[in-house]
Amino acid sequence: MVIDHDCHRELEKTQQSSGTAGHCMRCGARVLSVCGAMEPADLQRLAEISTTHIFQPHDTITIEAEPVTALYNITVGTVKLFKLLSDGRRQITGFLSVGDFLGLALTDLHAYSAEAVTLVTACRFERPKLESLLQTYPSMERRLLENAFHELAAAQDQMMMLGRKTARERVASFLIIQSDRGLREKISPTLLRLPMSRTDIADYLGLTTETVSRTITAMRKEGLIELVDMDKIRLLDLSSLKKIASA
Amino acid sequence: MVIDHDCHRELEKTQQSSGTAGHCMRCGARVLSVCGAMEPADLQRLAEISTTHIFQPHDTITIEAEPVTALYNITVGTVKLFKLLSDGRRQITGFLSVGDFLGLALTDLHAYSAEAVTLVTACRFERPKLESLLQTYPSMERRLLENAFHELAAAQDQMMMLGRKTARERVASFLIIQSDRGLREKISPTLLRLPMSRTDIADYLGLTTETVSRTITAMRKEGLIELVDMDKIRLLDLSSLKKIASA
DNA sequence: CGGGACTTTGAGCAAATTCAACCATTGTGG
DNA sequence: CCACAATGGTTGAATTTGCTCAAAGTCCCG
């Protein structure tokens, strides 16, 4: 596992300050996230306190236990959140996609690390500025609360998966989750694009890459799924998959 | 596993309406929870919209996927939260103790079931009344948000445990978590009372009772812990346990 | 003292991991 | 433009961790 990203260089290179442009008005993530509640004039104000950042695949975005300096709203791409044990074992706690928030916390330190899976574009809000924003828009706090509860429910499903499901059930669950993840990542109702590696899937499911690979092969042979490409999977029998997922 | 609780009967029998009494002023959980931020006069108002409930061990408090009608604040005892698969496999997602909230959600349906582990006393707030309360005390919303983020961080630790830790590491983690759970459940700095059964511990750790039992026995033989009683464990070597827990 | 529930212990088993080899795709330099 | 190294994915065999099934021990409560 080679970790060799010129992360900081990359960051400076790709940072796009945007105090003047009304980029928030054109933001594709707007309809999905907090900004959706705002008036055009307010969006202009939002644009003034936010900057756009681009991250290359494998770029580190935040590091566990380091100070929280900013909040990001993902506008393009996929991000993985994870925790590490001292010997390198990794648990991916979730994947973020367009419209999702990263670094949303009231604590001073990040609870997890975050890394770009694909090319990622994100809208960055400096923490102190965010605080004042929250006071200006009380409805945003409510949205954040809703968001937090939603994540909490997802976390509980994940616990059930990690604690009690078999490898087969976990892989099925993963496919269903990806399929349900709005229509945003889906190419067609049944064709699914998985931007993350087998290793990432394994670390998300609490399995090894070998087990994930073997399970996917088995499902393919059973006619449950079809591997169109390494990162494209067609769900041929959604109802069976759902049944397996929540046994 | 016998499920035979006359839950509803029990509920009616033990419900203590308290519109007039200033029970919130005397509440032991107050300092630990949201109510701590309030003035005496406000506590009186709080007492007017809340009722005290008592649950016997094994009483069901809420059921997964059923409508959320109220929010409880635990004032005495321990509650377990769990999810079930159709074949009976169970995952305990957490234990609640004095000061913790139950049924805190903006969704209409419960994300999990909750059951009393010990004798439990809880302060019940009807949902519609709660909504108006939140509008009266905006600072409470912030507290709820903090609470949600705290739970989210705990959930991520739990995911790491379930997905990547060995049985030994899980049991050590459990003991450390119980030990860290404030001083509220602790008898002395090293003597720990575990109100839940081995089955509950197993369902929390994603293991079987046999594995939990064997692991505890092994730790006892190694001199890491001492079983004072079935439900009392003395942590003899906290630093070693901590090292094992977060390998 | 006896019955029931919970816990511990034991022996064999199975699911998933580990270790190892092989295959496919991609990108690089000669 | 092709050979070849590098990366990621798949497949196979052996191993191991934790599970299943079974029995014995312990605690509690009437």
Image: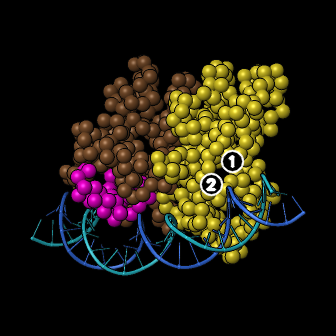
Chain colours: A yellow, B brown, C cyan, D blue
- The answer to whether residue B105 shows anywhere in this view is no
**Picture quarter containing residue D26?**
bottom left
- A79 magenta-colored: no
- B201 magenta-colored: yes
Residue identified by numbered label 1: A117
Of the image marks 2 and 1, the number of the one nearer the N terminus: 1
Where B21 sits versus A244, above or below? above
Q: Position of residue C2 (x, y in %)?
A: 15, 72
Residue at 49% over, 36% down: B150
- The answer to whether residue A24 shows anywhere in this view is yes
Which residue occupies the foreground of this view, B103 or A224? A224
Classed neighbour count for the residue bearing mark 1: other residues with Cα under 10 Å, few (<14), some (14–19), many (≥20): many
Q: Is residue A19 left or right of residue B24?
A: right
Residue type at numbered disc 2: Asp
Quadrant of the image containing the C terminus of chain A? bottom right
- Same chain under badges 2 and 1? The reply is yes
Q: Is residue A244 left or right of residue B220?
A: right
Q: Position of residue A139 (x, y in %)?
A: 66, 28
Where A125 sits versus B100, above or below? above
Q: Secondary structure at mark 1?
A: loop
Q: Main secondary structure of the magenta part?
A: helix
Residue type at numbered disc 1: Val
Classed neighbour count for the residue bearing mark 2: other residues with Cα under 10 Å, few (<14), some (14–19), many (≥20): many
Magenta segment boundaries in residue numbering: B196-225
Q: Which mark is residue A200?
A: 2
Q: Secondary structure at mark 2?
A: helix
**Picture quarter containing residue B212?**
bottom left
Residue at 75% over, 57% down: A193
- Per the model, the C-alpha gap separating discs 2 and 1 is 9 Å
Which residue occupies the foreground of this view, B200 or A112? A112
Residue at 70% over, 51% down: A181
Q: Are marks 2 and 1 in contact (CB under 8 Å)?
A: yes
